[in-house]
Image (spheres, rainbow, N blue to C red):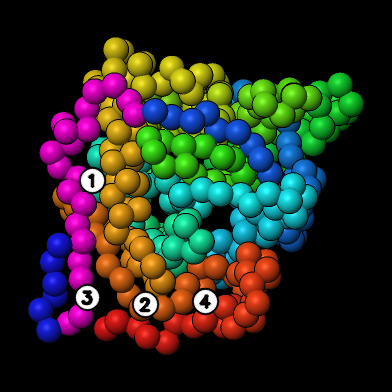
Amino acid sequence: MQSSGSASIIMNNFAIVPVSRFAGSSAAIRRPKEVAYFSYDDNHQFHLDERSIRYYYPPKLGADLSKGFNTFQQLDDTADDHLDSLLKTIIDLERRTSTKCTADIVTWRGMMTKIMATPFDNMNGFEMNATRFQDSIFIEENHEHKLESKKAQHNQSSRPGAPSQDLMAYWGYKFEVLSLIPDQWDPTSREFIEGREDVIVNNYAQYCSVVKTGIGKAKMVIGGEVDALWDRKPDNKDDSINWVELKTSAEIENDKDRLKFERKLLKFWIQSFLLGVPKIIVGFRNKNGILQRLEELETKNIPTMVKKQGRGTWDGNLCINFTASFLDWLKQKITGDGVWRIRRRERSAMIEIFKNEESGHGDILSREFIQWRTQGSVNGDEDVEAAKSSTARVD
């Protein structure tokens, strides 16, 4: 623990290195189980239903992933949505089941991906905000840092003759459109399937799954977007769902490309592991964005594939053990009222945690959620006002 001298900030540090102390058999994991879901429609409006669920149908090889770039309808994500949609979905779940949705950690899949990848991702930092409320720690991305990171990435100059960052991002969305249909194969028209190359790409619509899962001693509720269903949801809600994650990558032409792809597999694996997505379909494209081939990967087999067939650039069990240890430590540090910052600087050997608001929950928790959770209290309104208060900021 460190104090910043005259300032009143107390800094707690979790050491990332040596990572060897997290090696060995993985900590206990709880299979992700979908407990709720929500959709954003084509206008990115929130709905507590499955309207934006999509189904996988193989795309046509040779497709030009750049087609339609000039008509791309891209979502403006500069607004800070906090955890609002996830919390609305939890409220609905609790209302329907008359049971409190309990967890040690409540967050988006993206936050857990950053944490799990930390031992093998030295290039990317992160900043998150966290607060404890009714024995759960709620974690969101620090929006200011997110915008700064996106701006820095956007301003990176491409190599001479290489596609822009915006175009390469579009290739991923285009691949999704080429690979998705709105219903199962049988009721979907041949005309629609063959006309997907001409569909205007719009990344407003999303289906988001909310799962209960756990790593080590930490029980978690995580929300995140899933791309598609392989077939259909099972009738038995305890059975696994055959989700499909869609990814694009440059064609592998040499050892350097193979090493780069192996490192990309770390994020591919973590993202699907966290939500219980069993299959990843990678569309390999050439340097001009022409779709060359497809490869199906079973999520559970990726760490073994990297260990036995690759360069061993990362270890899945180590990522799990690191996350279990970090979350145990986090639960001990984030106690009581207030807002904390969780920060890992680029190339840093530690994750820092410090309190930057002494009271309340900042804007991490919506007023609606706090009201729902405190409505049984005699002083419900006062509880809400106290929870939203964040005037005592630490400099």
Kind of element beneath mark 2: strand
> In 3D space, how far apart are the residues under numbered discs 2 and 1 (Cα atoms)?
28 Å
| Residue matched to label 3 | 9
Q: Nearer the viewer, residue 291 or 104?
A: 104
Going from N to C along the chain, the mark reached first, 4 or 1, is: 1
> In 3D space, how far apart are the residues under numbered discs 1 and 3 (Cα atoms)?
26 Å
Residue 64, position as x, y percentages in the image: 60, 35
| Residue matched to label 4 | 387
Which range is magenta? 7-27
> In 3D space, how far apart are the residues under numbered discs 2 and 4 (Cα atoms)?
12 Å
| Residue matched to label 1 | 122
Of badges 2 and 4, the one in the foreground is: 4
> In 3D space, how far apart are the residues under numbered discs 3 and 2 (Cα atoms)?
10 Å
Residue 357: image tag: 2
Looking at the rendered structure, the kind of residue marked 1 is: Asn
Q: Residue furthest top?
A: 308
- Residue displayed at 34% across by 47% down: 327
Going from N to C along the chain, the mark reached first, 3 or 4, is: 3
Looking at the rendered structure, the kind of residue marked 2 is: Glu
Of badges 4 and 1, the one in the foreground is: 4
